[in-house]
Amino acid sequence: MTLSKKTYKALDALRLVFQVSPVCTALHVFLSIIQAIMPTAATALTTANFVDTATTILHGERPHDDIYMPLILLLLALGLFTTVGAVVQLVSSRININLQHKLKPALVQIHSALDFKHIENAESWELISRISRDPVKSIMDGFGAFMQFMQIVVSVTSVLILIVTQVWWAAIIIIAFSTPMFWLSMRAGKKNYQAGREAEKFNRRTEYLDEVLTGRDAVDERTLFGYGDAVNKSWWKQYEAGRILQIKVTAKMFLITKGSSMLLALIALLAALTLISPVVSGHLSAGMFMGIVGAVFGMINQLGWQMSYSLENISKVSEYMKDLTAFVGLSEAESSLSEPDTEPIEFNSLEFRNVRFKYPSGDRFILDGLSFTLKAGSHYAFVGRNGAGKTTITKLLTGLYTEYEGEILINGKELRMYPASTLKALFSVVYQDFAKYYIPLKDNIALGDVSGTKTDDKITDAVMQAGLGEMIAKLKNDIDTPLGKISEDGQDISGGQWQRVAIARSLISRAPVKMLDEPTAALDPIGESQVYSEFEKLMRGKTTVFISHRLGSTKLADEILVIDDGKIIERGPHDKLMAANGQYAMMFEAQRGWYQ
């Protein structure tokens, strides 16, 4: 299943459901029509027949045995109605499963191909959150609403035909009062979805705070600092803001639509009263009176309550489809889903020429005239204050952002001229916020080279080089042990060990340029310096880039580049920069005590 770039409408909910499950959808439509006809064509008529037969038997006009056939027909109608309803629910469940299997992967594929700028943009991320929250439920609610609306139309039509034959003016009045309810119900659905859209920013905040209050990652600090009450108050404030926003709209539309339903109920009562006279005069049998009255009140329940609910959900799915249209219309990164090249290109040089860059949602240049050159086989360190632009360099190099001014040249060729697969194979980056995958350790490390041949020997070498040998000795199933607590046989490891797992991913990668973007920021300065020192030994003769605002590891670099306000303000080896007594020397002297 693929979601093409197009304008999606409410009826596309039917198309998508039919696309993933055509047989079950067709069966659902057929059974829904049968289910809609039965209350009037079967239940009402069999009820009338049963009551009329029973009445004549009580008057002695017919033998007692005549009651069995009307009773059997009534029971069959009721049983068939119940059975059809159960089958419809079963078919609906099957459609739901098929939609789960096909819709979610299609959305994930689009999500994974999006331009990185949409991930870091608050507005587009809220759109992504709305689309991803429960897409199957949104589509199934829309599909169910269309089916329910179809049933109501079929059922009401059959009831009105029955009423017209007895009290024609009551049918006209019911239709006249029902028409505005279509508009009110559609308006209610639109208003409710828009209120939900406005409440999304509060929902995202409550989800984050909920994770802080209940998640495993924060349990130590939550216990130590006792901030639970304060965070809980903040959670409640955000939750109430979203709830009140939603409930104001819901309550208002509920009163309007259900007030109209009460008028319809009154009309049904009047229609029933007008039928008493024909019953008394003998023009209408008691059984037909009961059948019609039951059908009328059932119809009013459908018009006043079920119809407003179905139209409200149709309106909601219409609004969801607008979001889906916007979602599939978001720009995608070229070749974002491609795997890295099997063989990386030979790396000779990297040059930034007067590069200027600001984030799409930002108003200042993070990099402002940045120029430098890196040569193959050397160790480099980028240092500077937080926010100086160090991590932004890695985002540009790996192709996450391409809307920059100036030139970035790799081997003398502009970076944007390379396919994404080439860039993926060229750079291996260990980020500060590296991912923790709750899968076996072997697979965790193998992710560092998805396009290469991963043998157990290669993985074991990377494990040992990353200093994980002692940890593996304590794991239940060696490198096949799942990490984390999701699996029953999973085993948790420390933060420092997770960092070494991330470094092992980089070690197994065949990328010619290795970059460490403060992956050890959570360690103490001495521990960080030791990790960088070990990594430097392993990478001798290869091109490495260290990015840090702590300077214990910078002495290992052949050349240090100091960034401030998006520019290189100092450059050279450690001794030269210390002798220059500039910003680097000031930063190093300020941190000297951390490493001594």
Image (tube, rainbow, N blue to C red):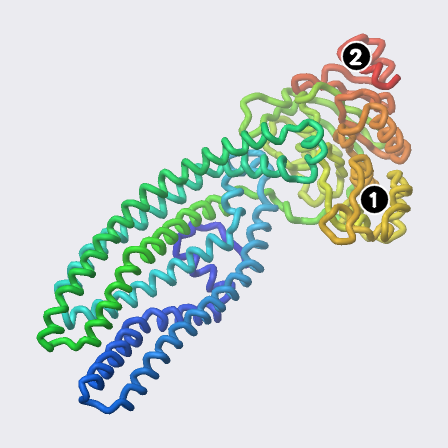
Residue at image point 86% right, 19% down = 595
CA separation in Å, label 1 and label 2? 36 Å
Residue at image point 30% right, 76% down = 42
Residue 299 to residue 120: above or below: below
Q: Is residue 289 left or right of residue 11?
A: left
| Front position in the image: 489 or 146 | 489
* Residue 283 picture location, percent across and down: 11, 77
Label 2 environment density (alpha carbons within 10 Å; few <14, some 14–19, many ≥20) = few
Q: Is residue 536 left or right of residue 90?
A: right
**What label does residue 578 carry, if any?**
none
Residue with the mark numbered 2 = 590
Total marks in image: 2
Question: Which of the 4 quarters of the picture holds residue 403?
Answer: top right
Question: Which of the 4 quarters of the picture holds residue 512?
Answer: top right
SS assignment at label 2: helix
Label 1 environment density (alpha carbons within 10 Å; few <14, some 14–19, many ≥20) = many
* Residue 186 picture location, percent across and down: 32, 50
Residue with the mark numbered 1 = 508
* Residue 404 picture location, percent across and down: 61, 29
The answer to whether residue 343 of the structure is visible from this angle is no
* Residue 408 picture location, percent across and down: 68, 30
Residue at image point 21% right, 90% down = 62
Residue at image point 47% right, 52% down = 138
Mark found first going from the N terminus, 1 or 2: 1
| Front position in the image: 262 or 412 | 262
Residue type at the position of mark 1 = Ile
Question: Which of the 4 quarters of the picture holds residue 14?
Answer: bottom left
Return the residue found at the far left: 281
The answer to whether residue 72 of the structure is visible from this angle is yes
SS assignment at label 1: helix
